[in-house]
Structures are given as C-alpha cells and as structure tokens.
Amino acid sequence: MRIVIDDRCSDVVVRDVWEAIPEAVRDELIARRVASNDPGAFGRQDPVDGRWEPLRPVILGTRAYRRLESIVARLLWLGVESCRRRASTLGELHQALRFPYELPLMDPDGPLVASELTRCARPDLLVEGGQPRVVEFNIGTRLGGGTLAPRMAQGYCRLSPEAGLYPPPSAVIARTEAMVRALGGEVGGDNPRRLAIPAYRTVDDTGMRRWHKKVKKLVLADVERVGFEVVRPDLDELRLDATGRLLAADEPIDLVLIPWGSAEVSHLVDGRGGLAALRSADRAGTVVLFPRTESVLISSKAVLAWLHEDCDAGLLPPADHALVRNHIPRTTVLGLDGAAPDEPGSGGATGQRDRMVLKPAVGRSGDGVLFGSHTSESGQWSPAVDAAREAPVVLQERVEPDRITMPFLDRCSGQQLSARVPFLLSPFLIDGAAADVSVRHMTPDATDHDVVISVSRGARWNTVVLVDDRPVHPWGERRG
C-alpha cells in the first residue's frame, strides 16, 4: 500500500468556516441547540469544571477535510516506513521503542505491515495559521467504535437542515466495512461469518476488579447489518478445536473484534487461557484479529522523532520531507537506549525550553506533559528530562494553536457567552480513509497561556460537520 499526498489540496488551509454562514442561519441553529434536550444527540458530558456546553459544531469545508485525510494517511504510512528502517520484526520494534506494555497477542517474529499497523487511527492535530500539525499518532484497538462524534454531527445537521451541513462518513460504518475486507470479501447470505466480541475482566494495581461486557448498540447493529453473526463470549470461554480453529460456545469464530486497550492487557484476568487460544488461532491463520493489537506501537511519539531524524539524514524524497517538516512539529526522543539523556536542547537555555513541550513517549490524557514556558530549569524540567532513563520522553516544538469563537451555555444558570478557545482535531482514519472527526476544545474558564487540551483538564468534546466549499455555498453566498 502506497498512499500519495493529493497535491490539489496543498494550498487549502484548515479553518472553521462558521463565520461564513449567514448570521440568521447561525442564530437559528444556536437557538434550536439551546432548546434541544435530545440526550441521544447532545447527551450531557461530565467535564472537570461541570459547566459550559458548546452550542455549535466546528464546521470544515470539504476540501479542508480531504486535505486532513491525505496528510494524515501519508504521514501514517511514512511512520511505518521509518519504523522499518530501525526494526525488521514487531518484536524488534517493541524493543527499540522501549514500549511499556507487553502485547501477548503480538507475534514478535511478525513483519511490519503498514496496512495492518495503520488500520484504525485517530491522530491528534493542532491547527497553526491554518496548517494542521500532527502532535500524536493515536492508533489502537478501540478506535472506530466511538459514537459521540457521529451522534453529535448528525444531531446538528438535523437541527438546521437549511444550513446545508452534513456529517462526515461514519467511522463505525467504515470500521465494519474494513472488517469485511479483512475477511476477503462478502459476509452474510451464502457466506456466513461469525464475529466474536469478547467480554473480559481486569484487575487494577489496588486489586479492584472490573467486568467489561458492554457493547455500544450502534456498533452491534452495524456489524449485524452487513451480515455478521455476532457472539459475545467471555474471554475465559475461548478455546481451540482439534484443527486449531477458535471456538466460542462450541461454534467456530472467523473474526475477533478486540475490545480492550493496550494498557489494559497487563491487567486482564485470564484464568482459563483465552488469550493463549486467541494467540494460537492467530498464528495458525484460522482467525482474524481486528484490529491488530501491535498497531499501538505506532502510537509512540518516538515515531514522530524518527521521521524528523530521517529528514535530517536525507532519507525522504522532497515531497515527503516537506510533508514531515510542515505538518509534524520538530520532535526529539530521549531515553530509547535507557541511558541518561544527553541531547542538544534537552535542558539548558531558557529560550530553547520556552519553545518546547516535554511528553512521555507513550501516554494519554496529558499525563506527564510539561510546557517549558511554565517550568524552571531546576524545578520540574530537568528531573523530567532525567527520568527518560526510566521511560522515554520526547521534546516537541510548541505549537501556537489557532482559536475558534465558540458559543457556550451554562445549563445551571442559563448564562450564554462566546469565547475564543484553542481546539484540537482528531480525524478517524480507517484503512487510510477519513471518517468522523472528534474535537476537543477548552471552555471560557480556560487560561490564556499554554494548556493541554484534554477532557481530564476541563476540555469539552465536540464534533465536525462539513459544508461544500464550491464556488456557490448551499446557502447562496457566492465566493469571490
């Protein structure tokens, strides 16, 4: 698989086009959103601050949306190529990244296959001066099953059909269709296939046990729509027959939709060998695992640093070199060899530190992220750099994110106000094609300086809807 950037979109900036919609249409959409109490489309979120519901989506033109797709798809492919320069097997890559989690379903001798390792992705992008900047490759087993972004997008489009807005393609549907392709063709009818979605138990470091068996109705309905026969066994119930086929309730399984995240693997309770059965059937080629659990390796931010190293070494052709430099902030990885960091810019000059962000190479929710502009050399910064000998970290060029004007409602007081807030886009890519776009943005209470745009830090979930950006807008305004 070779994904080529679409040069026709190279001059398209990524901007929220809310202000281009006529004021009367904007006002009507907000009024309907305030009056709406549809928990299916706009269910209450539970942010840290407990206030401020956004009253409109982020709106992108179709060309900007397709530009996001082509940029991210190509960068993901280049990321796997960068990994191939440093490892020939998945086990070697796991070791080279000093990846913090064991991946028991991974074949350490397996090759690096781009189409498998980038099957389901949801990168995080900040927009700076209209240019998307990828700050993280999110890849993992749970992606594509989220239903909040598509429900919100469809809800907004229903609120104001006269605005000409429409939702992006559904990531849920795209993932289902990718499962069908993974089995090599049609499902259902004369070609019945059985899909297992295992329930599982975890135990955390405190000994607390949790039972994970819920499957979102939209996800379940869509796999049944295409003709899968769905079974929902306990992980402990999985076993092999005499020929090496995976069985659940004595029925052979064709595909397993992996429901747990990479960090949960070390906490799985597997008293009867369900994981071993999955691994054996996978190695024997009698079942398809979707997606591959080892795809999470590409999520390490060290891969972003490797791409810049490859640019420095002149290993990329000019178009790809420009793509990396323009759309991935300069990133350096520290601690991959387990030694004390000794890299230019790892501390020292305040001017350098102020322009950098320190992040764990593998992490989530903004945990462990430090802005150099917020720290002193002798305070948090140097100890965090030195800690790279325990777990790799990256130093990433700070991005100055564009802001959008977002109207908010405080449901408790009824107060409405607008604020200019930083935002982050997370487009879903399934087999290289764009689908829904999840959005996180801050609230009116956010500080004006650098901030991690994370729900755990008070950000709100939102969504993207699309509008045709042809010479004539659907609402009749002709562009110059």
Image (spheres, helix red, strand yellow):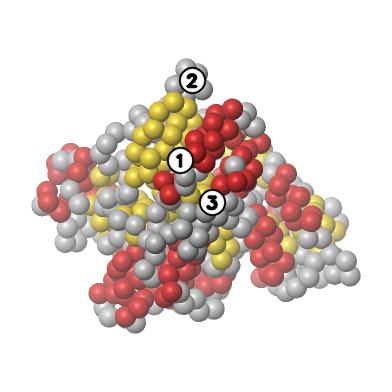
The spot of residue 467 in percent (x, y) is: 53, 55
Name the side, left or right, on which 144 lies relative to 286: left
Q: Is residue 273 left or right of residue 413?
A: right
Q: Of the two numbered discs 2 and 1 on the same chain, state the one appearing first in sequence.
A: 1
- Quadrant (top left, top right, bottom left, bottom right) of the N terminus: bottom right
Query: Residue 406, located in which quarter of the rendered image?
Result: top left
Q: Is residue 408 above or below residue 155?
A: above
Query: What's the residue at 62%, 45% (across, down)?
Result: 161
Spot occupied by residue 344 in the image (x, y as percentages of width and height): 16, 61
The residue lying toward the viewer, choosing from 312 and 20, is 20
Residue 332 x/y as whole percent: 27, 61
**What amino acid is at disc 1?**
Glu
Q: Which residue corresponds to mark 2? A: 414
Which image quarter holds the C terminus?
A: bottom left
Q: Which residue is mark 3?
A: 475
Q: CA distance from mark 2 to mark 3?
A: 30 Å
In this image, 155 relative to 440: left or right? right
140 or 49: nearer the viewer: 49
Label 2 packing within 10 angstroms: few (<14), some (14-19), many (20+): few
**Residue 23: which numbered mark, if any?**
1
